[in-house]
Image: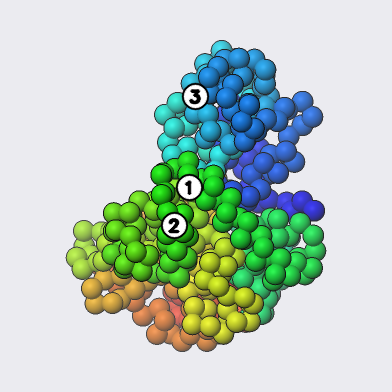
Amino acid sequence: MYITRAMEKTVLQIQSSFPVLLVTGPRQVGKTTMLKKLSDKKRQYVTLDDPLLREIAVTDPGLFLQRFEPPVIIDEIQYAPELLPHIKMYVDRTRNNGQFWLTGSQMFHLMENASESLAGRVGIVNLLSLSNSEISGQKSCVFTTKPSNIMARLKTVKPQKLNEIFERIFKGGMPALYADNENNFSNTGTDIFFSSYVQTYLQRDVKDLTQVGDELAFVRFLSCAAARTGQMVNYADMAKDTGISPPTAKQWLSILVTSGIVTLIEPYFNNALKRIIKSPKMYFLDTGLCAYLTKWTTPQALEAGAMSGAFFETWVVSEIIKSYYNAGKRPPIYYYRDKDNREIDLIIHENNTLYPVEIKKSSNPGKNAVKHFDVLEKTGLEIGEGSLVCLSADFLPIDKQNWYVPAWLI
């Protein structure tokens, strides 16, 4: 069963504007499946997972492009960066849009290489695992704190109860888990899927990106990172818990970022804010993988456990990030924390305006939950409407500027 992706419209717009389309993202999030669904019968498909084809692409890129003449989908382009200059020469000769559709699983290195080799010729989008809206078959849109937009969304989105939200959080958004009726995929099956996923990730991306001598230590580090989702990064603590050095912890965390497993959200910086803490916050981008790595076995145990608040926050943040990526936009999000322990979970910075967002796993968090929003007044920028994303049953005002937003509305 194919689940319609919110990014499809963005992909078609980009391919009609650029000769090359590059879809990046973690493994098994559906990049190739989406492109095959959108392509016509004339477009060839080739994967560089095939070692023979990869060898030709690396050693004789010109011959490779003669054999697989556009329009073409080239899967896992990171295995043959030598192709990129030859693709540039080809599109400069022909000057037709939509000729090359590329996918890759190592996001930032690949985006950097493509941006350098194909400057002005490539449109890049980042696909993550399925969003809550995509799984539910509902319309997706970029997250906003503006009340008028949220009110309009109320008419199209079906409410979800606490147990339904935590079932989504526990399972995550990997498309393979929803290939059949989602209710038929047992917790044991989810466990088997993620066990295989981690092994594939170790054998491919990790070995490609660095020489990890001790795979067991890297798996411990992966689980250590999962246990810290929603927290500020502390390399010394992560190194101590894993039995590695802080520089190695920093290198390994960069691998998790590059391969799309986690994202780092930087603190919001402004010259008027003197006492901010400058460490980034780390979030897993798929809560199902995070739950597997932290050894939760059921949605009910996760919801009642000590990490339920961190998982709820991680899920909300990942949904907001997906809403931007699916529209082809870079998420303009930051967080705030100062040395007086005043914290704002997310700050959306758009059009010289700051929109604060707090996230609480509670049905009635109370007005105190947004008390730190006023620290942003020192920035000199305009402060927009604020959201308190929580388990409220309805979209309700907190005061003139801020609103309770049910999590199922994001």
The type of colouring in the image is rainbow
Q: Amino acid at mark 1?
A: Val
Instruction: Say if residue 339 shows up in the picture.
Output: yes
Q: Quadrant of the C terminus?
A: bottom right
User: From the viewer's perspective, is 341 left or right of 126?
Assistant: left
Residue sitting at x 45%, y 47% = 258
Q: Is residue 26 visible?
A: no
Q: Position of residue 318 (x, y in %)?
A: 53, 61
Nearer-N-terminus badge (2/1): 1
Instruction: Say which residue appears at 53% left-offset and 23% top-offset.
Output: 58
Q: Which residue is mark 1?
A: 206
Which of 196/351 is in front? 196
> In the rendered structure, which amino acid carries the disc numbered 2?
Phe
Single out the residue that lies furthest toward the top. 93
> Where residue 231 sits: x, y (%)?
39, 69
Which residue does the image show at 65% across and 66% down from the upper left? 191
Q: Percent position (x, y) of residue 34?
A: 69, 44
Residue placed under numbered mark 3 in the picture: 82
224 vs 103: above or below: below
Camera-nearest residue between 191 and 291: 191
Q: Nearer the viewer, mark 2 or mark 3?
A: 2
Q: Is there CB contact under 8 Å for labels 2 and 1? A: yes
Element at label 3:
loop
Question: Decide: marks 3, 1 in contact (CB < 8 A)?
Answer: no
Q: Which residue is mark 2?
A: 218
* Left or right of residue 176, residue 328 in this image: left
Label 2 crowd (10 A; few <14 / some 14-19 / many >=20): some
Marking on residue 379: none
Q: Which of the two labelled residues, at mark 3 and mark 1, occupies the earlier sequence position?
A: 3
